[in-house]
Amino acid sequence: MSLKLNVDRAKDYYHQMLLIRRFEEKCVELYSAEKIRGFLHLYIGEEAVATGVIRTLDEEDAIVATYREHGHALVRGIPADRVMAELYGKAEGISHGRGGSMHLFDVSKRFYGGYAIVGGGLPLAVGMALADRRLNRDRVTVCFFGDGAVAEGEFHEALNLAALWQLPVLFVCENNLYGMGTALKYAESETNIAHKAKSYNITSHQIDGMDVIAVADATEKALKHIHSGKGPVFLECLTYRFRAHSMFDAELYRDKKEVEKWREKGPLVTFRKKLEEAGLWSQIDADTIEKEVEAVIEDAVAFAENGTWEDIADLEKYVYSPEVAS
Amino acid sequence: MSSETTYREAMREAIRTAMQEDERVFLAGEDVGRYGGSYAVSMGLLEEFGPERIVDTPLCESGFTGAGIGAAMNGMRPIIEIMTVNFSLLALDQIMNNAATLQHMSAGQINVPIVIRMATGAGKQLAAQHSHSLEGWYAHIPGLKVLTPATVQDAHDMIGLALADPDPVLIFENALLYNAKGTLDITLKPLPIGKAKVEKEGKDITILAYGINLFKALEAAETLEKEGIDAEVIDLRSLRPLDDETIMASVKKTHRVMIVDEGWKSGSISAEIMARINEQAFYELDAPMGRVCTMEVPIPYARHLEEAALPNPAKIVAMAHKVMEDA
């Protein structure tokens, strides 16, 4: 444990990961109750990645994520009630019901979405970092994407540009071994994704994405590297999605035993074990955290339930910027 | 303050002025720097502004267009140059799925003040992967604005208009126009985005055109004049938004309309304009509307085939006669 892990930090990580876990579990319920519609992609099993990375960032750093981004949004501090209201499609949602589960945005938290075209967010992250450098702002743009994105042309274009121009981008590959139902080994000639990134002259590491401390540790080192002007860093986080790809997925492509095996090293289980070894578990008061999280989620559901529907008269709002008086 | 210059130089001058006035403006694209721009629009700008602001990119349309969008989201005013409209299809994901949607998906939290310029059109024997006119396609997409400068004045003015706009603006530059000469008056207040311009007044028939076809239409109008037909020629300038007001005012005046469009007829911008006239001014029409479009083939290489595929003044004159004689 190279990262200095104190009780406060341990509490925070546990709280964040549990918040994601319980939020996503509630989403399953609400989906079955038809409160949430459309596509719903759950982050259960992968909580350590978003938590370890995002809790290590500065508040000025920007985040570009994917359509499996509830966890990232929550960890970034976007209020759970605004996220839940968005999943309900309510006017009080963070995107006023225009985006839904796959398109969460909160610019005040420098959370830039929510992209549902696999690989489509990577060039944006490159451009955001380019802007920061041009405007002399010492900030980092973090770009999350899955292993599926690695097969897309935009992945390679973006990595090349970021390395060529030595931009302050942290690429975080959430390798959960499946692009929807196709295993990585059926999609990639080289399944070590960090190796691919290395071929673009990017500092790359493959890390244990089930271990929040390992993720936070790697992120801290990566940020140092980037701030010192040495260009982008690539982290391949080995992780696993415990639930189906989306609510329409019958999971015919993987063995239940495989899922069970990964559950045993799930991020919450792993973290608890580590805390126990370090003698910190008894100090974090897990029951209180559980209750706090439960209350946040109850409030979020109530907020969404009590939310209002955007007026259809406003349907065509937000297509173009409001007219600026000349 | 007016002077004679070329379309290319007018555009370069506008880019130069914008870069001098606003540090946030930069130009990026394939061969815009050391090569000077594939159509030489940016010739000399690298020396003046340096490689941080005149940015040569690798061949990755999606990558550098997406990077432009990201930069625009984060405080810059990028001008992205795509060599030719056919290549823009490689960036279509970024243009359609990101630039055009972010304002809406984020409920107004994000706007994308990007300018994307590209060469369009046929006439240089470049065959079916360098010659198409897809501006009408882009005009289909809510969230985008689509400009088609025809004149030297607009080649200049539309750069400034596009950069001042808070949303994504696409500029389609007909490749045959870069050498065209015309008058530029930099003291003129630019005609806003979304305004069409009556280039020649007339009372008998309205000819709507954009880009290089404006000049074909004007040439046709001269011929028609000798034949006793007084055509009104309108430069659409902007395909999204379309200037319904100017179009309908002309229809009410002449009662006969034809459109010249270098896109293919099926699902084209000319079809959209006809539909709007039908919706808004049907009872003003004295005859069915006509149009001259590109033949429904991929643009061929051989000169005579390419010419036969495209609108030209003779076809415009013939169609004008048909519209005049009908009903």
Image (spheres, helix red, strand yellow):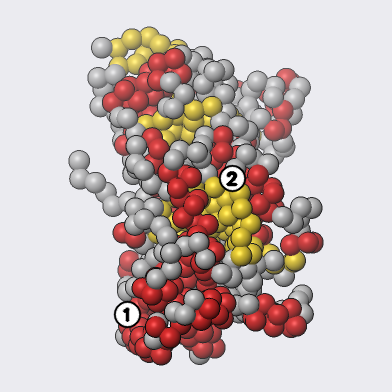
Q: Any mark on residue A299, and which?
A: none
Examine the image and state in which quarter residue B123 appears. top right
Q: To which chain does the residue with label 2 belong?
A: A
Residue pointed to by mark 1: A308
Q: Nearer the viewer, mark 1 or mark 2?
A: 2
**Residue at point 78%, 61% (across, down):** A185
Q: Any mark on residue A203, and which?
A: 2
* CA–CA distance in space, label 1 to label 2: 48 Å
**Residue at point 57%, 77% (across, down):** A270
Please state which of residues A184 and A216 is positioned toward the viewer in this rendering: A216
Q: Is residue A260 left or right of residue A75?
A: right
Please state which of residues B75 and B199 is positioned toward the viewer in this rendering: B75
Q: Which amino acid, by three-letter code, is at mark 1? A: Thr
Please state which of residues B249 and B228 is positioned toward the viewer in this rendering: B249
Please state which of residues B172 and A142 is positioned toward the viewer in this rendering: A142
Residue under disc 1 on the same chain as residue under disc 2? yes
Q: Secondary structure at mark 2?
A: strand
**Residue at point 72%, 36% (across, down):** B298
Residue most extreme to the top: B4
Q: Can residue A156 be seen in this snapshot? A: yes
Q: To which chain does the residue with label 1 belong?
A: A
Residue B255 % position (x, y) = 42, 40
**Residue at point 24%, 46% (across, down):** A324
Q: Which amino acid, by three-letter code, is at mark 2? A: Thr
